[in-house]
Image: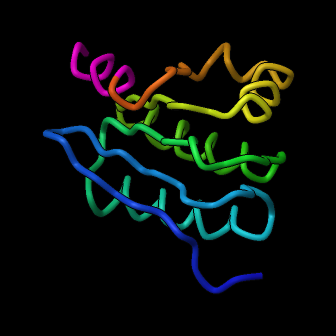
Amino acid sequence: MSDNINFELKRTGDITVFRLNEKRFDASIAGFVKGEFTILMHTEDVKKLVIDLSEVEYCDSSGLSAILLAFRILQSNDGHIRLASPTKNVKTLIEISQLDRVLTICNTVNEAVKDLESL
């Protein structure tokens, strides 16, 4: 288990882009990501979040659980979330678990940002 995760945060107006720069989004980092999401939502007052998954080649249920945590926190605060640029494997997992019914998936970060700007 690593002591830190590699990610970038970028704010554009009222939209925060969280880019996970990890190949694997699994149990080894999911707890750290959940912590970052919780801090972001509660201390930074983030209401619109884009999660950029373009670097993630593998995701398991722990990774999905972290994404769902962000979704639930945002939903309870009238916020919105978009997933951007998932790799084929990650997108397939999201679809198999039917999370694409509650999570909006965008092909690019720009598409996700534009979608949130319209809200």
82 in relation to 26, above or below: above
Q: Between residue 89 and residue 70, name the one nearer to us.
A: 89
The main secondary structure of the magenta stretch is: helix
* Placement of the C terminus among the 4 image quadrants: top left
Who's the residue at 26% across and 59% down the image?
44
- Observer-nearest of 64 and 87: 87
Specify whether 29 is left or right of 106: right
Q: How many marks?
A: 0
The relative height of residue 7 versus residue 94 in the rendered view (above or below) is: below
- Specify whether residue 117 is painted magenta: yes
Task: Place residue 47 in its image quadrant.
Answer: top left
Residue 30 in the image: above or below residue 111: below
Residue at left 80%, top 33%? 89
- Pick the quarter of the image with the N terminus: bottom right
Residue 81 location, quadrant: top left
- Residue nearest the viewer, comparing 108 with 69: 108
Q: Position of residue 96 (x, y in %)?
A: 86, 21
**Residue under the image location 61 percent in, 70 percent down:** 32
Start-end of magenta stretch: 111-119
Which residue is at 69% across, 61% downward? 30
Q: Is residue 37 above or below residue 13?
A: below
**In the rendered image, which quarter is residue 79 located in?**
top left
Q: Name the side, left or right, on which 117 lies relative to 19.
A: left
- Report if residue 35 lies within the magenta region: no
Image coords of residue 25 (percent x, y): 72, 55
Whole-percent x, y for residue 71 in the image: 53, 36
Q: Position of residue 52 (x, y in %)?
A: 49, 42
